[in-house]
Amino acid sequence: MDVGELLNYQPDRGAKRPRGEDSREESRSKQKTTGRDAGRVLVRSEPDSEEQTGGDGEKILQRLMDQDGEDPEGELVDESTVKKMILTFEKRSYKNQELRIKFPDNPEKFMEAELDLNDIIQEMHVIATIPELYHLLVELNAVHSLLGLLSHDNTDILNELTDIDTLHESEEGAEVLIDALLEGQVVALMVQNMERLDETVKEEADGVYNTLAVIENMAEFRPGLCTEAAQQGLMQWLLKRIKAKMPFDANKLYCSEILAILLQNNDKTRELLGEMDGIDVLLQQLSVFKRHNPATAEEQEMMENLFDALCSCLMLPANRDRFLRGEGLQLMNLMLREKKMSRVSALKVLDYGVIGPEGSDNCHKFVDILGLRTIFPLFMKTPKKMKKVGVSDKEHEEHVCSIIASMLRNLKGQQRSRLLSKFTENDCEKVDRLMELHFKYLEAVQLADKRIEGEKHDMVRRGEIIDDAMDDEFYLRRLDAGLFVLQLVCYIMVEICNAGVPQLQQRVHQILNLRGGSVKIVRHIMREYAENIGDGKSEEFKESEQKRIMELLENF
């Protein structure tokens, strides 16, 4: 070996990748695809003479995949290998940081350190396959450095470490890692990082997507962190990103999904969204779909996510008022009339907006904006288009009956008279339709009851005990088979019979007698409904509502 060779000699740094600059670029630009992100990122590399020859692109891709599957230095990955990796990562991370501070305006000075750091990060991806060793990341204080990667282009390793399937493989290791990430204010850091990223640059847009994937993984593994995440600036960022005037893309879809997740079964996040004028943001974004259908399946998914978020928000009474002030009822009414895809979800939102005593103001407003002209045609005939967008007749009829039942419960004075007059017009055709639904769902429930009785009989014969939990399960199955719609229909029947309009009561009893129905059955259904009423409500509300239903039944 001559002097020139000696001076140019570079030691081999292991089997992970060759030393050459081109392969450095390959390694650096290679993006890991996660479960949600599969197919979204292409492998990019610098064009060179080797790649330009036909068919060599496949060889390079294969080589990158082979390298990805190798353990560092070809060793078996165990505790000591992981420790070595983490320590190397810590050293390189520190050196990179030091050089970046020293030469902020001279990237050439820290390029070598940057590439070395990237190499060890690529090697560390293997740790994501062994969650039982996650505790080492915490014990060796690597979590702080991992969080530092958020200001780097390497969010994908955090994405892999928090992949939900991996987390469930070793819950103990996962708990340790998530605790350490939360202690390091991971969500606040991620939000700060997303705020500085420019999504018009593809790599930075991918960084936002990877960051959202980390948040989703963590929220799925530990739903309790949703409140904390929302309060650490995530809710504000999501609302800002959703209303940003940018073309629809995968990130906007993902934001709508994360928002819907944050609001599930969580009154604190619902309240926070209401205080941030989030109801207005949701209504503004949905108003686009009142006269136009979503252009793609992805855009349709985003629309559904925003509707789900709105329904979640309306579970909180304070948000019903914000919905009313934001003219949400007018928007839903327009959507129901326009007959576009949004009609299905608008009906569901309307149901959530008027239900219970807290929906009283919305009920009165809905009548004032001529909503009865919109809802009763949907009651008289279930649109065929509903099936095309994946909604069953039962789901549609449930929402419509629930809205009418809520109005009968909440309306007073002139608005109530207008509602009742709807039932008398055109020779009581609405009552005829009501009775048609009664017998349709009564038959469905009787079939379900038969099956359940058969199952109970078999269980008793086998010596199994039917406990309260089993009874609850059977009741839920009956509700699902159509009992809930039947209860709503019976409630409407009982309400209109008590309205002091003899014509309505006569028509209900006439049809019951004609079709072999029975007042006894209606009473039994309503008593069962009263017994199970008030889930999640106060005991006082439950008692007053039961008393009110019993009084209605006495006069039926």
Image (spheres, grey):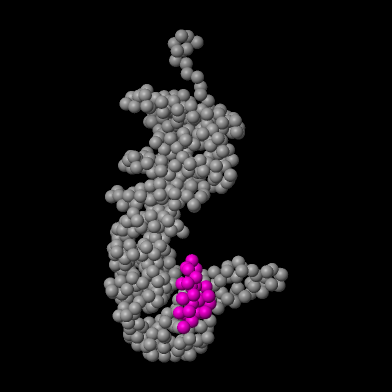
Residue 282 visible, this angle? no
Hey, which residue is sitting farthest front in the picture?
A: 540
Measuring 48% from the left and 68% from the top, which residue is drawn there?
538
Residue 15 visible, this angle? yes
As for residue 527 lying within the magenta part, the answer is yes
Viewer-closest of 314 and 440: 314
Q: Quadrant of residue 459?
A: bottom right
| Numbered range of the magenta stretch | 525-551
Measuring 60% from the left and 33% from the top, which residue is drawn there?
79
As for residue 151 lying within the magenta part, the answer is no
Is the residue 546 above or below the residue 67 in the image?
below
Q: Secondary structure of the magenta portion, mostly?
A: helix
Lateral position of residue 157 relative to residue 298, left or right = right
Q: Quadrant of residue 286?
A: bottom left
Measuring 53% from the left and 75% from the top, which residue is drawn there?
531
Lateral position of residue 60 relative to residue 192, left or right = right
Measuring 37% from the left and 41% from the top, which residue is drawn there?
192
